[in-house]
């Protein structure tokens, strides 16, 4: 038991250290583990601690709710963990990755590095592929080369729907461990706000607010935990208390 408590203490210290270098937090909370909808809040670090800087807004999760993902946080010993195809949004603390969109340039006021999505841009979700959970261009990485399959399935990063008009990759499973989950994004809601298959979605107005607020130099992190589980991590990880 002493060893377990020591490991938990060390893991909590690691999460606190990650948060200690961040000056911006995107805090996303749903009511329960199986909730399909929740709230996004933006916090910035001040001399007094974390301060909420914008009015909150509604977000949409996977249609099965949330499960603990792989990020910069320690993993709970007894919990439901995210896996490929479970239709759950990842819970935990995550760095943000690539920002893609349909337009020729990022919206005005956005400082985040931008990649224009094309009809051949993909994010691979095939656990058997060497490109699992990575963004590729099908022109450069075709499905098959001389009869050898490089990947069997992938998310199209540009299609007729508006969902991926703006997309920020959430660094869930950054080690690309097969089967632990892939293609996790912050993106736009569908017109009817249908639950996602594991991403976190919001309306375009709120996405633009988020994009214009994020400062890459402040090492923004996504904190996503159901409200029923959030409380203990205020102390353990140094998270901002919820309003």
Image: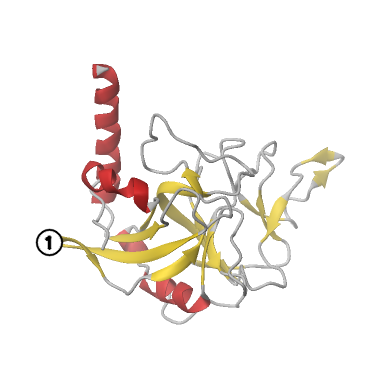
Whether residue 106 is visible, yes or no, is no
| Extreme residue in the bottom direction | 108
Looking at the image, residue 228 sits to the left or right of residue 155; the answer is: left
Image x and y of residue 66, in percent: 49, 48
- Quarter holding the N terminus? top left
Query: Considering only vertical position in the picture, is 48 above or below 84?
Result: below
* Residue sitting nearer the eye, 183 or 69: 69
Q: Residue at position x 23%, y 48% from top?
A: 238
Give the total of numbered labels.
1
Whether residue 114 is visible, yes or no, is yes
Q: Residue at position x 27%, y 18% from top?
A: 3
Image x and y of residue 40, in percent: 39, 65
Q: Residue at position x 26%, y 43% from top?
A: 232
| Extreme residue in the left direction | 48
Image x and y of residue 197, in percent: 61, 54
SS at mark 1? loop
Image x and y of residue 52, in percent: 26, 67
* Residue sitting nearer the eye, 110 or 165: 165
* Residue sitting nearer the eye, 69 or 23: 69
Mark 1 residue crowding within 10 angstroms, few (<14) / some (14–19) / many (20+): few
Residue on which disc 1 sits: 48
């Amino acid at each position: 038991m002493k060893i377990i408590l020591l490991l938990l203490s060390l893991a909590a210290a690691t999460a606190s250290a990650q948060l200690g270098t961040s000056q911006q937090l995107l805090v996303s909370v749903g009511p329960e583990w199986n909730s399909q909808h929740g709230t996004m809040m933006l916090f910035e670090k001040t001399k007094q601690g974390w301060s909420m800087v914008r009015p909150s807004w509604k977000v949409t999760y996977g249609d099965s709710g949330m499960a603990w993902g792989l990020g910069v946080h320690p993993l709970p010993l007894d919990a439901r963990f995210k896996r490929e195809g479970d239709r759950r949004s990842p819970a935990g603390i995550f760095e943000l990755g690539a920002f893609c969109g349909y337009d020729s340039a990022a919206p005005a006021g956005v400082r985040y590095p931008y990649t224009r999505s094309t009809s051949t841009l993909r994010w691979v979700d095939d656990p058997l592929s060497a490109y699992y959970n990575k963004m590729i261009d099908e022109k450069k990485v075709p499905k098959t080369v001389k009869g050898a399959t490089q990947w069997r399935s992938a998310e199209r990063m540009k299609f007729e729907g508006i969902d991926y008009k703006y997309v920020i990759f959430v660094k869930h499973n950054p080690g690309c461990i097969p089967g632990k989950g892939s293609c996790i994004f912050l993106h736009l809601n569908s017109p009817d706000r249908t639950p996602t298959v594991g991403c976190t979605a919001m309306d375009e107005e709120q996405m633009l607010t988020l994009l214009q607020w994020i400062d890459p130099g402040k090492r923004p992190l996504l904190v996503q935990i159901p409200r029923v589980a959030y409380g203990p991590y205020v102390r353990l990880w140094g998270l901002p208390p919820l309003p």
